[in-house]
Image (cartoon, rainbow, N blue to C red):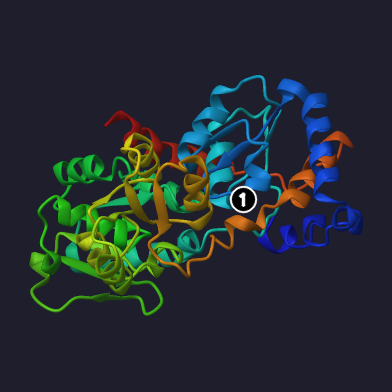
Amino acid sequence: MSIQEMLKQPSFSLADRYRQMTREQMEERVREIKKELGEALFIPGHHYQKDEVIQFADAVGDSLQLAQISASNKKAKYIVFCGVHFMAETADMLTTKEQTVILPDMRAGCSMADMANIHQTEIAWEKMQALFGDTMLPLTYVNSTAAIKAFVGRNGGATVTSSNAHKLVEWAFTQKERILFLPDQHLGRNTAFDLGIDLDEMAVWDPIRHELEYEGDLSRVKVILWKGHCSVHENFTVKNIEDIRKNDQNMNIIVHPECRREVVGLSDDNGSTKYIIDTIEQSASGSAWAIGTEMNLVNRLIQNHPDKKIISLNPNMCPCLTMNRIDLPHLLWSLDTIVEGGKSNVIEVDEQTTNDALLALNRMLKQ
């Protein structure tokens, strides 16, 4: 099914009855369906989901972690993935053919993943090979489409997470002289910088203009960064940090490595979503934290740790808008559809794409 066909599915004209139900009525119905389906239903929920959804998650975590947990749950016939499209794709690729992966709302995409499509990537690869020859290895953040993962797999590369990016970049340099890092330039830049690569040894590929942004001798380029970013994490700024330092010198600042290089450089610490959660959980009572990551997660950390002073690094930050397409009405609708014997919003990745993408995923897991 094409994206255009998906957009015509019922999830985009949700029945009025769901809009007319109270939150309490919807919650009670979800609980009834979960009880009715039992082990045949599994609901993974990403950390950035709303509380109204995450309360029903059977597992909460990052994207790859949730896909792996889904794959290990052989009893589940239906996996209703409360995340975004690329996460559900990964879950489909890792689970069996007997399992059905469902995304409650097909509009739940990822702006970062959408910044690198396969057509752009193939053009870029051809042009960069003309510039650099056979000296490049592609790496892609797991926050990318199945098609991009497959491209990386076919070309000898691997996927990376924000937790293992350092290890995978080090591995990549044992394979080739240069790396192409998709689709998040900030994670790529921060990781390479931490490993001792100078900023003037990094170029940026603009997929819109189909050109390399770099001034200087091309022979010095070690890392080519795809010009993509997370629309949430890019909104944390140097001024946010300066304001915190000015107003509360005891505040610890911790950010996600999807933030800009200058923001990460001025922070006290940075790391993956899991790293941020673990750091807050293990910190001393009474400690103060300004966190640079998605607002739903920050709010949940505030609720879970009343003994600590926790704020968002950016006081005007909004939750991830595409992630928040998954709400209680859409979750209930997808569960009702299962109970009624219907089949909507099913995520299916074709066999060839799956096989190539798994090459990239498995190379990562072997490192």
Tell whether 51 sits left or right of 173.
right
Give the image quarter of residue 127.
Answer: bottom left
Residue at position x 47%, y 35% from top? 65
Measured as percent of width and height from the top left, residue 193 is found at: 16, 57
Measured as percent of width and height from the top left, residue 145 is found at: 49, 53
Residue at position x 23%, y 57% from top? 190
Task: Give amino acid for label 1.
Answer: Lys
On the question of residue 136 being in view, the answer is no
Measured as percent of width and height from the top left, residue 260 is found at: 30, 65
Question: Dot 1: within a 10 Å radius of its alpha carbon, few (fewer than 14), some, or many (20 or more) residues?
Answer: many
For this rendering, which residue is in front, 68 or 349? 68
Secondary structure state at the residue bearing disc 1: loop
Q: Quadrant of the C terminus?
A: top left
Q: How many marks?
A: 1
For this rendering, which residue is in front, 37 or 197? 37
Residue 141 against residue 65 in the figure, above or below = below
For this rendering, which residue is in front, 246 or 180? 246
Residue at position x 88%, y 52% from top? 21
On the question of residue 100 being in view, the answer is yes
Q: Which residue is mark 1?
A: 50
Give the image quarter of residue 221.
Answer: bottom left
Tell whether 153 sits left or right of 61.
left
Residue 173 against residue 132 in the figure, above or below = above
Residue at position x 33%, y 34% from top? 282
Measured as percent of width and height from the top left, residue 360 is found at: 38, 40
Residue 12 against residue 166 in the figure, above or below = below
